[in-house]
Image (cartoon, rainbow, N blue to C red):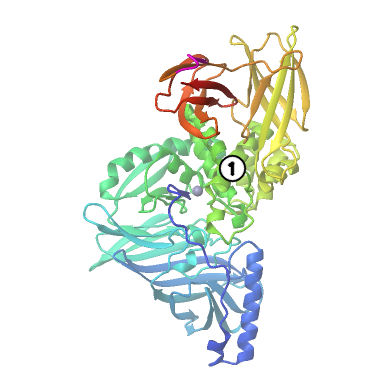
Amino acid sequence: MFRETVSRAILMLAMLLMLDFSLKAQNDDFETIVQTEKSAWLRNQKAQERGGLVSAVNRSDIQYCRLHWTVDPAVKYIRGTVMTVFEPYEILSSLEFDFSEALTMDSVLYHGQKLIFTRLGDVLTVEFPQNLAAQVKDSLTFYYQGIPTSTGFGSFETGIHGPDSIPVLWTLSEPYGAKEWWPCKQSLDDKIDSIDVFINHPAGYRAASNGLLVSEVTIGNTTTTHWKHQYPIAAYLICMAVTNYVEYENLAPFNGNTTTILNYVYPESVSAAMEGTAEVVAQMQLFDDLFGLYPFQEEKYGHAQFNWGGGMEHQTMTFVGSWGFELLGHELAHHWFGDKVTCGTWQDIWLNEGFATYLSGLCYEFLLPQYWQNFKQNRIDISTNEQDGSVFVPDTTSVARVFSGRLSYAKGAMVLHMLRWVCGDDAFFEGVRNYLNDPNLAYSYAKTDDLKNHLELSSGKNLNGFFADWYYGEGYPGYQISWSKKPTNEVTIKIDQTQSSPTVSFFEMPLQLKLSDGMSDTMVVLNNTSNGQSFTLQLDFSPTMLEFDPNLWIVSRNNFVQELTSTGEPVPKYDLTIMPNPTHGKAHYQLRIDAGSEIEVHLINAEGRLIKQDQSFALPGVNKMLLDVHDVPAGWYQLQITGKDFQIAKKIMVQ
Ligand SMILES: [Zn+2]
């Protein structure tokens, strides 16, 4: 999933089930109710400990669902019939399903017989007339209707689009919203092996869903659209969208074959969509090469437009609100990371979102390399915007925390990039492919340790320390690097590190440094394992500049590089002169720097107050710039210039 606007209100989910003994006790045996509710409450406590919200317990294997929905995009309402085939793991007298209390369950049929069911919050429990044997396939059918509550990012929504205000209806269940519109088991421990989806909707519209389109049959004013999906699927990835879609296809070739990309688009958006989805072909071929063939090859890939500002990776039918390169790459990437291999708890969401974000970056690296450096810098900046927070999600009751753009997306992506740096390209991509193809994980669920184990196997490295620092630990390092050279071209580099969060005592990392003299340069990698560590190198030229992490492998901030003379004095690398000084009206300042840098210019008065500020870009060498002070009162000021890894200040007298 990818949200394009962070300002959208995020609905927080209710954490605790409210118990109401008195109301129900009027009709039933009080003791039984208390017992039932107590055990349900305990189970729900356990569900929370597992990292989920209040939810049904995993006591059976859901093997198949036939989902029959009747909707009209002009009306926020659903009528549904859901046939569920399941196999109990244990002897069962009852079975729980996740199902919103806002909906009405008309009846539950079991072998032609109506079952008794009870409801407690969003958990519906059916009671079987006799015990069900373990490991014996069985089925039941739910008949329900109502106005769905919309939770999370809008689990069941209606809207309008286009100049004619055509109604549209869509779903987006991640993370906890499937139960808002159908009875399911939405814990992350069981995928449904296959589904059939039948959508009854007004004729003239098309309905989008998972898998292959089987038929569209119109009788009178109603069309029934049938989709069939025969890959294992998590409940939150099942989807439906209905409106007056226009359809077109793109074809992605692979090994002499093609994958169809089926697009359901608003009529007014066709040209924008066509421009965007055409680029998905190259993205799919890139992911095929790097991570193995598109995992739902036997069926299709697709896009269906909806009114949400972002995208959602519904299995084989991504919903998108726009057609940008990065958004489409992100959602496609989820089909390997999120759909084929799904995070096993919401604490592990970075296995979905970190990977999808990183793969949208790989689309730049391999397809539009001019944007790759900027992508990395941007993700580092976002990751280090605040000093704390882990990629690991400690609190899954907050949807906003699970889907933190800073931690699960940006830092998650950069943690993968750092794993690639630490393991090396070959071991990283091999380990990730092995993770995707692991028979215990493929078309199932994975946890962070599964990825770690595969990368340890492929790289031969112990990654305990890495994961302790970068996944469970919080924050980022800042590097203070001082270096000096001898006439013999021997260079000494001393590296100090600070940590933004006390949860990490030291980030042990290989560091890439570039030494250059304007003519020659050399790249070195130093294995930084302790604070104040010194390294001595013999070069065949006399460097004038040292650049820290020029390829942006590491999440870091506030880095500082300084050259020292043989006596330990800082070599001035940045020089600022102001002319004339004193001045009135206008002055010029000259900034001499070694490397081009964004600069922040501050004029500060004698009391330390910021009087003027400006942002600019300074080129390597001497930059001459205008300083307009005609509108500031006479007195002493400080002109302060802050660049990528320097800060320099000079006093100026305004008369
Ligand atoms: Zn995503």
Question: How many numbered circles does the render carry?
Answer: 1
Asked if the stretch drawn in magenta spans residue 579, the answer is yes
Q: Is residue 28 visible?
A: yes
Please, is residue 15 above or below residue 622 in the view? below
**Residue, x 61% and y 61% (percent of image)?**
189
Please tell me whether mark 1 sits on a helix, a strand or a loop. Answer: helix
Q: Residues within 10 Å of mark 1 (few under 14, many from 20)?
A: many
Residue in front for this viewpoint, 62 or 412: 412
At which x and y percent is residue 279?
40, 36
Please, is residue 530 above or below residue 51 in the view? above
The residue carrying mark 1 is 411
Which image quarter: residue 358? top right
At which x and y percent is residue 226?
37, 61
Side (left or right) of 450 relative to 622: right
Instruction: Tell which residue pokes out farthest to the top in this image.
Output: 487
Region rendered in magenta: 578-583
Q: Main secondary structure of the magenta part?
A: loop
At which x and y percent is residue 483?
71, 19
Residue in front for this viewpoint, 534 or 84: 534
Asked if the stretch drawn in magenta spans residue 500, the answer is no
Side (left or right) of 330 relative to 39: left
| Kind of residue at badge 1 | Lys
At which x and y percent is residue 160?
29, 58
Please, is residue 316 above or below residue 148 in the view? above
